[in-house]
Amino acid sequence: MIARRFFRCALIASWLGLWVVGNSIAESYPVKPIVIIVPFAAGGPSDTVARILAEGMRKSLGQPLVIENVVGAGGHLGTRRVASAAPDGYLLGIGNWGTHVANGVIYSLPYDLLRDFAPVALLPSEPLMVAVSKAMPVNSLKELIAWLKAHPNKATSGTSGVGGPSHVGGLLFAKLTDTKFQLVPYRGAGPAMQDLVAGQVDMMITGSSTALPQMREGNIKVFAVAAKTRLASASDILTVEETGLPDFHVSVWHGLWAPKGTSPDIIATLNASVRQTLADPGVRKRYLDLGLELPDADQQTPEALGAFQRTEIEKWWPLIKAAGIKAE
């Protein structure tokens, strides 16, 4: 009897000890730099969202947030890195509609998009834009569509990779306009945009954060935004409705995830930092100037991101399967 009581006391003490240690770790988190994996090349939309976010979160967390670009396979190489990381809050991942929705259909993934990640927060989203090289002999979306119809499969359109938003956006654009052009995959939107500026590809359907800076420098032409309303930061750019393409609405959302099993206390700390960052007027202005839209406060919880991702999977997986999009 005494031995049994001793064993029970020892077991309870052990549990209490683990609970105290776990709480103390969560309370002191973070005590070292945090790595954020961006599964695309530097200079693309996800990279831009991540770098602005990291600067803001550093202030509230008191630790540097280091961006690491892990590119390849439509973003799933970097996403896999997050799925297999230790759930200690020191390696996180930026994802988007492509990595956390489309890739589940296009690739045979070694991880589960819903079960192997812990949602942290929904991040800014951006509508796609129709952009062309300065060398293209067109000056409006209507002229571009007419040129593409007159020259089938002559134009090239850069994409961020197979199954990425610019790839799926390009397929949808071709379908709605009844045009044909060649889709050229890159290792991210940044390198694709560099070739558009250089005239190595003719057009690109890409996010506003990639297109607007180059348009403002006079390096490319942007004809329309794939949204129902004009962007506040670029009100001179017509919407697709105004240019005669009313059904072409494509917006790319971003999110922040941790590996599954990450402590709820750590998730709460990270989420609070994200929310504080997105509420900062300076950060908001930087995002808005790039044409990005910020989620409402009630959309910034981990639960909201998880529910939104599930809804997007239910919406897009049947459409992507029907289109027959597969990794090349």
Image: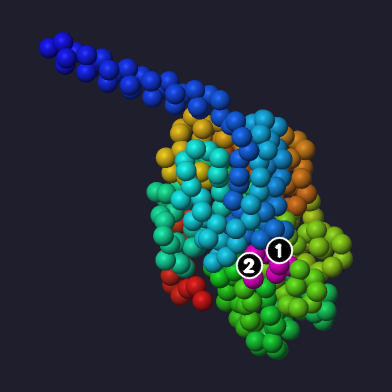
Q: Nearer the viewer, residue 47 or 18?
A: 18
Task: Tell whether position 188 is magenta.
Answer: yes
Tell me where residue 122 appears, x and y as whole percent.
Answer: 57, 44
Q: Extreme left residue here?
A: 1
Amino acid carrying mark 1 in the image: Gly
Image-quadrant location for residue 9: top left
Q: Is residue 81 visible?
A: yes
Q: Residue at x 56, y 48 (%)?
A: 93
Q: Residue at x 62, y 77 (%)?
A: 183
Q: Which mark is residue 187?
A: 2
**Label 1 SS:** helix
Image-quadrant location for residue 222: bottom right
Read off the residue under disc 1: 190
Q: Nearer the viewer, residue 92 or 107?
A: 92
Instruction: Identify whether 296 is placed above or below 323.
Output: above
Magenta part of the chain: 186-193
Amino acid carrying mark 2 in the image: Arg
How packed mark 1 is, by other alpha carbons closer than 10 Å (few <14, some 14-19, many 20 or more), is many
Tell me where residue 131 appears, x and y as whole percent.
Answer: 74, 69
Q: Extreme front residue here?
A: 3
Q: Is residue 176 visible?
A: no
Instruction: Identify whether 49 is placed above or below 183.
Output: above
Tell me where residue 14 appears, x and y as whole percent.
Answer: 33, 21
Q: Residue at x 53, y 24 (%)?
A: 27
Q: Extreme right residue here?
A: 218
Q: Which mark is residue 84?
A: none
Task: Tell whether position 79 is magenta.
Answer: no
Image-quadrant location for residue 148: bottom right
How packed mark 2 is, by other alpha carbons closer than 10 Å (few <14, some 14-19, many 20 or more), is many
Cα separation between marks 1 and 2: 8 Å
- Is 170 situated left or right of 111 in this image? right
Tell me where residue 133 appears, x and y as whole percent.
Answer: 79, 74
